């Protein structure tokens, strides 16, 4: 039995279905990331789990106990808000200790718990300050301290890093991961940033318009996206999509992509060998699956060399992203930084078909 | 060329400045003139006043008329000055301001953070209360006070002022709390604070500026109110404003302008004091909010 369970959850606001038939399970100590574009209902779901918003129907349970009708304070959860929501009239120490004070924890025990958390987060020197005297990163730490001090059963994070600048965000991301590793806390984390989702999660839930698109480990989500939406949303730059169709020549099934009769082998991700001839498909391949000849993975089983016209080169320092065009279709490849490549040049790319996935264009689902 | 245009524009800017300051000075003088006349007259002996020059400074200033106004002047048939009425007003204003401010804050809290179906209608009705003229509620209010047994008492006046002030104080606090982040309330809920704990520990400590605004507004209005005072109290229970009117209109032969003026100064003093003391906190509160970011 999983530690946290959401069953058949619906939420309607007016006649709008904000969340539709949400089913989630999370084991103790898991790190679940809810990810999706803005307005997909991920924050609503988090608020529902926190008890800050009533459900239309469905069930939420923690450790076997149904918590639907429990007041937020009785659910034994702690939440870190996007705005940090630190009480401006209290010092850092009072902020961290407020929940304990409300629960009637004695002063001495409270002080000890606050010291302990402050030490973990390295904010001991800030305890007497007020939130207005802290920097963004320090406020973030205090907000986490306020959640940690309670030792709740589940931590809820609502886009906690989105108010920080890029460098600090990466630092705090690592900090959260370290903290999770150290405390083995059960965490539900909402973000619209797919990199945060990939780096932090043990389990990712991708939401779109209130419907779960896919649940899986970061590797599953990334390598085996359930549909076109997930494939496009996760990963940056986005996955390349090539329209094509199935062709059989001399009994060998192949995929024809682009217009110039470029044929590639059937990707190994597709087990179904009964795809009819002429079936329209979309072939998805991530930028790192399209490389220069020098970067080809030596273990690759199936690949194709394809020449295309380079239109734009984007060096990132570690690698170079190349945008190329073939028969009116643009795609992005990732080549080594030291490959000499320039726009308007013809370049031979290697397509690693072990990493390719096929989608059904009408349903958008991945073909398996 | 450019230097020449600069001097011309510089000169015209200076002229504009001079005109503006002159105008402001004249208007300030006009505005302060009654206060000046009040103060100087209250310090003059009667024969100096009879000399007829209202704007002249007192030649032999004395506080005699202040003492008289405070402790000896005749109001109606009693000659004990205005001090009793001054305390009447204090006893009325302090609870009325405190109660209406607290209730307004609670209303604002509920109307923004604990919304219920129809909260807009309720707020609209409370807003409507701000626009009801005093005169319209006199007779129903007299009836209500009679039923409650509060007629002709300080408690009755407190009740009237609380009821009448509630619309304004609710408006002030609702608009202030509307901008107060909901996430703070949610965080406090998860932390285990209940309805009143959140109000006392989170909302109120962060309401400094709006409390000061409300207190200044309510204090000034209630202290200066004459209509409710004259309608719902009489004799020894009257507030200061009513007593001042009675003092001025009760004549015992000679018209003592200096005593009248001294009594008027007493009547104006508390509101002035509230502005001087609390006004500074008000500005400080605004600054804190502006710099915090």
Image: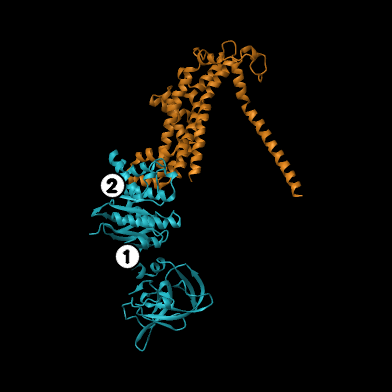
- Residue depth check, mark 2 versus mark 1: number of the one nearer the observer: 1
Between residues A122 and B38, which one lies in front from this camera angle?
A122
In the rendered image of this protein, which colour is used for chain A? cyan
* Mark 2 vs 1, N-terminal side: 2
A126 up-or-down from B70: above or below: below
Badge 2 crowding class, 10 Å Cα cut-off, few under 14, some 14 to 19, many 20 or more, is some
A362 up-or-down from B81: above or below: below
Q: Hey, which residue is sitting farthest bottom in the picture?
A: A250
**CA gap, disc 2 and disc 1:** 30 Å
Q: Hey, which residue is sitting farthest top in the picture?
A: B253
Q: Position of residue A212 (x, y in %)?
A: 35, 63
Indicate the colouring scheme. by chain
Q: Position of residue B220 (x, y in %)?
A: 51, 29
Provide the residue designation for mark 2.
A74
Badge 1 crowding class, 10 Å Cα cut-off, few under 14, some 14 to 19, many 20 or more, is some
B171 up-or-down from B252: above or below: below
Q: Secondary structure at mark 2?
A: helix
A226 up-or-down from A56: above or below: below
Quarter of the figure that contains the C terminus of chain A: bottom left
The chain letter corresponding to orange is B
The quadrant where residue A6 appears? bottom left
Provide the residue designation for mark 1.
A217
Between residues A265 and A137, which one lies in front from this camera angle?
A137
In the picture provided, is B35 more to the left or to the right than A341? Answer: right
């Amino acid at each position: 039995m999983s530690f946290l369970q959401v069953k058949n959850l619906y939420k309607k606001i007016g006649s709008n279905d904000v969340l539709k038939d949400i089913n989630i399970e999370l084991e103790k100590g898991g790190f679940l990331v809810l990810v999706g574009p803005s307005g997909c209902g991920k924050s609503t779901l988090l608020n529902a789990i926190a008890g800050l918003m009533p459900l239309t129907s469905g069930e939420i349970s923690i450790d076997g106990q149904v918590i639907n009708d429990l007041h937020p304070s009785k659910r034994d959860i702690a939440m870190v808000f996007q705005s940090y929501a630190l009480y401006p009239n209290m010092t850092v120490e009072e902020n961290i200790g407020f929940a304990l004070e409300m629960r009637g924890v004695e002063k001495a025990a409270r002080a000890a718990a606050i010291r302990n958390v402050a030490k973990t987060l390295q904010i001991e020197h800030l305890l007497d300050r007020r939130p207005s005297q802290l920097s963004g990163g320090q406020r973030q730490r205090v907000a986490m301290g306020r959640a940690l001090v309670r030792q709740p059963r589940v931590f809820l994070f609502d886009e906690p890093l989105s108010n920080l600048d890029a460098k600090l965000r990466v630092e705090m991301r690592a900090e959260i991961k370290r903290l999770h590793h150290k405390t083995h806390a059960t965490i539900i984390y909402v973000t619209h940033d797919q990199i945060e989702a990939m780096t932090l999660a043990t389990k990712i839930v991708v939401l779109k318009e209130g419907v779960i698109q896919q649940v899986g480990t970061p590797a599953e989500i990334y390598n085996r996206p359930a549909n076109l939406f997930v494939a496009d949303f996760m990963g940056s730059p986005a996955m390349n999509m090539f329209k094509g169709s199935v062709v059989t020549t001399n009994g060998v099934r192949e995929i024809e992509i682009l217009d110039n009769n470029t044929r590639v082998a059937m990707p190994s991700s597709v087990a179904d060998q009964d795809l009819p001839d002429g079936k329209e498909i979309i072939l998805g391949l991530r930028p790192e699956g399209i490389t220069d000849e020098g970067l080809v993975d030596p273990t690759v089983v199936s690949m194709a060399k394809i020449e295309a016209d380079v239109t734009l080169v984007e060096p990132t320092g570690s690698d170079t992203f190349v945008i190329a065009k073939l028969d009116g279709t643009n795609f992005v490849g990732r080549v080594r930084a030291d490959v000499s490549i320039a726009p308007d040049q013809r370049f031979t790319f290697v397509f690693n078909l072990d990493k390719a996935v096929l989608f059904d264009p009408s349903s958008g689902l991945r073909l398996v | 060329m450019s230097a020449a245009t600069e001097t011309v524009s510089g000169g015209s800017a200076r002229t504009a400045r001079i005109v503006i300051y002159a105008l402001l000075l004249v208007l300030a003088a006009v505005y302060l003139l009654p206060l000046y006349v009040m103060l100087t007259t209250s310090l003059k002996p009667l024969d100096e006043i009879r000399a007829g020059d209202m704007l002249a400074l007192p030649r032999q200033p004395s506080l005699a008329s202040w003492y008289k106004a405070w402790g000896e002047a005749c109001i109606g048939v009693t000659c004990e000055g205005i001090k009793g009425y001054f305390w009447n007003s204090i006893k009325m204003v302090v609870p009325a301001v405190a109660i209406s401010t607290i209730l307004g804050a609670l209303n604002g809290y509920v109307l923004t953070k604990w919304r219920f179906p129809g909260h807009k209608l309720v707020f609209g009705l409370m807003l409507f209360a701000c626009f009801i003229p005093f005169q319209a509620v006199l007779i129903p209010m007299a009836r209500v006070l009679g039923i409650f047994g509060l007629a002709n008492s300080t408690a009755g006046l407190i009740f009237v002022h609380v009821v009448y002030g509630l619309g304004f104080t609710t408006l002030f606090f609702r608009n202030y709390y509307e901008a107060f982040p909901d996430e703070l309330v949610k965080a406090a809920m998860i932390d285990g604070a209940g309805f009143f704990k959140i109000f006392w520990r989170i909302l109120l400590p962060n309401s400094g500026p709006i409390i000061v605004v409300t207190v200044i507004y309510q204090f000034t209005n209630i202290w200066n109110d004459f209509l409710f005072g004259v309608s719902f109290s009489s004799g020894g229970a009257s507030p200061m404003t009513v007593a001042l009117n009675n003092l001025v209109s009760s004549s015992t032969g000679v018209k003592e302008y200096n005593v009248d003026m001294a009594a008027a100064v007493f009547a104006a003093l508390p509101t002035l004091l509230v502005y001087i003391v609390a006004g500074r906190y008000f500005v400080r509160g605004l600054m804190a909010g502006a710099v915090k970011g």
